[in-house]
Image (tube, rainbow, N blue to C red):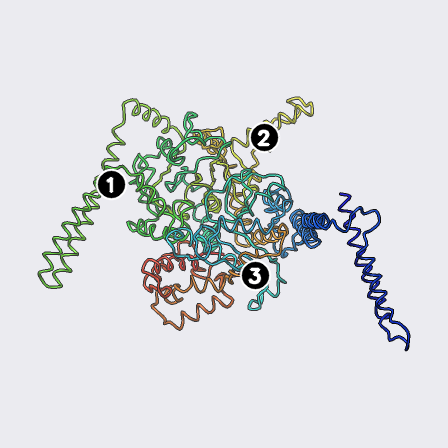
Amino acid sequence: MERVLRLQWRQSLQPRLLLVLLLAVPQALQLPQRGAPSPAPPLLAAAAAVVEQPQPGAGVHATEWSVQQRDMQDLDVIRTEQPSRRALQQDREEQQQEQQEQQEEAGGRQLQPAAPAQLPPECGRYAALWADGSPAAEDVGWWRQVGVSQRMTEAAVAAHAAWPNRTRNALYFAFIGGRAHVLPTDLVTTKFRTHAPLMAAYMKMLLHLEERYGIDSNSSSSRGSGGYIPDVDFVITTEDMAPITPRQAPEAARQRGRAPQFRYGKLLNTSTDLLIPNFHFGLKRYDSELAAAAPAHNSRHPWAAKRPIAFGRFSNYARRRPPRGQPPVLGVGGRVVCGSGDGGDCLVRRHLVDWAAQFRPPAAELRPGSESGLEEAASAGSSGSGSSGSSSSRGSSSHGSGRRGREAGAGSDGAGGSDGEDGPGRRDEEVKRRKAAAPASRRSASSSSSSSSSSSSSSSSNRSSKGKGAKSTAASRTVARRQQRQLLARKADRRRQAAASATAASAATAAAAATAASATASRPWHVDVSLHGRVSMSDHAAYRWLLHLDGVGLSSRFEQLLALGSLVVREESGYSGFYHHLLRPGGPRAQADAEQEEDVEREEKGLEAEGEGPGEGQQRRQSGGGRHYVPFWGPGRTPEELAQVLDWAVAHDEEASRIAAAGQAFARRYLTAPGRHCYMLWLLQSYAAALAYRPPAAAWAAELVPLREWVAREVLVAAPSDGEARGEGAEGAAERADAAGDAAGGEGSGCDAEGRSRHGAGGGAGVKVMEQLLAAVRRGGRGKPGDSAQQRHDRGVLAAAYLASDC
């Protein structure tokens, strides 16, 4: 080390001597006076002597050149091992950048307003939906503590949303400058066929928010509103089940988490996704049909005239099993019918239908009067497998209309069919699942029958090919009719076999059924539930008690039943929507809880039993004020609780009527389009305050396109004209172009100020808007250039769902 220091000292001295020489040489090189000697040679010689002379104390002899050379090499090695000034500066800059990113993630909420922007004055009426302490406020508040970074949003889009070349059941949206944008994808692919019409309802809602509350030069209402929508980006999904994402520490969420998805339902305390209104508010035409027809339902079916039957029609969906840590679903007698560790399907609905068959009303009770319009219900049978029509006016065509309604997301009257989670194409998944689960013998029998029919068809076609073209067409039609008759005969055989197996019960089962029947005969109520048949929502209003069971996840049928003025008896499955926290349960369970609270209050206050009047507490419990529905079943309870609920409803008929009226009033206040839109506006403002960056996310910003233009290009290209939708025939390509231009230029949502669809508006309940639009779409057969026949069909269904949906 000492040798290295000496070398460094000597090397630092040499440049100094050279600098002195450079300063002295110009003076030395001045022309000398004549006869005077030149001073340059002595100076140069002296400098050379100084440089060549060893430094005092160095201990290095001039002849030891090899030692000096080795020392110089050692010094070069030391210098190369030490970091350069540029590398140190680069390291410091990287550290500062990392610290800045951490500060932005930790305190990124300062990039957005600290509090949500001001809402329109009309939204104050619905503030209870997002008040402090509500699940929505707590969820958004937690995300504001975490701070949603750009990396988290990009990870959520990469994991869940659809890309231009990838299909998912979610889309990435963004509001930029008050205008809605979307990350485009192919809407008519096989994988997205089921969920594309569901997403169409959300696209229409976002365009309506843009028109009402965004900044758009083409909308006068937007300019008047001042622009309430901030810059924000988010992912909307139509999946039934939310992933299990419990809350973590903010640091852990920033390191490993993704941005939340906007979804319609979830199990509370198991997911950090944010709740939004269900897409069936639009597809089922909640405002145009259900809410608008509420006065007519009340006048046509007053409480005293409603039939004392607990009624329900459900789709045969299997529920997803509860996640680990959640309580199982208990069946009759406390048997576990759906546990987190079990395998197979979770047939909750079928379990209730099978148990409730003992309370089915007799055939005489099934035949309704002239007002109910349910004459097909008499053919249901005691097994609960019969079908039920929609109205007497539709007759036997109700099944066909129901199928067409399911294809477009609504029932025969536009209000939905047997269940709220039915949607365009959603039946396809159930059909595929049932086909995969069918017994091998049935599949082999069907394949053999199909092969035989195909062979007979081929032989017939070969024989007919020898004749003229007209004979060939007639023969093919004959074969088709024969195959159809064979198919109908097989279906009839299966129905007869099912009926025979149902009646061939054991002696013990028959005795139990007889005992239950005798007990039922003395009951003042009956239960009519089935997994088959479709009954319109307007005909549901004829029954005094309406049963609700969740499906795969949260069912949207609950909000539809609340609007009918009947008492809704709801299964407490644990799934929750954006408004469920405002509902208060009534019935025997709530009465027992109130009595227990009163007993605890008496004990705390030290009051004796006679301290309060004997009728005051009971009168307060029976007031029914603020109660909206009656719960049954749920964690730790069995379906037999339904009998207790119905006994209570009969004994407390007046209170039950008040609960039914309160539920209908709640639906008309909070669940109509203005309330849903104000909630969405608050959610967009609050979530924007949780973002730690300026949206949109940089990874997808270049791919975003205006939503209104994309809808006109991808959806409305298959839409019929107004004349065609009314069945007046084609009006020409010019009218369709004008309609598409209007849709892209400012009327893209197709809804009025109250969120009602302009298609079928004013027609009241029972207007077959979906069927009319689907028929017009099929007649037109339009689509994009290059679309196949299936793609034109899917795009037509998508256009019909978009046009008919409320906002």
* Number of numbered markers: 3
Q: Secondary structure at mark 1?
A: helix
Amino acid carrying mark 2 in the image: Ala
Residue 558 seen in the current view: yes
Relative placement, left or right, of 806 versus 378 is right
Q: Earlier in the sequence, mark 1 or mark 2?
A: 1
The quarter of the picture where residue 139 lies is: top right
Disc 2 to disc 3, C-alpha distance? 44 Å
Relative placement, left or right, of 433 versus 208 is left
Q: Secondary structure at mark 3?
A: helix
Amino acid carrying mark 1 in the image: Arg
Percent x, y for residue 257? 56, 44
Q: Is residue 676 above or below residue 710?
A: above
Q: Dot 2: within a 10 Å radius of its alpha carbon, few (fewer than 14), some, or many (20 or more) residues?
A: some
Q: Are marks 1 and 2 in contact (CB under 8 Å)?
A: no
Q: Which residue is mark 1?
A: 443
Residue 544 seen in the current view: no
Q: Which residue is mark 2?
A: 594
Q: Is residue 33 above or below residue 302?
A: below
Relative placement, left or right, of 37 versus 206 is right
Q: Which mark is residue 212?
A: 3
User: Mark 2 or mark 3, which is nearer to you?
Assistant: 3
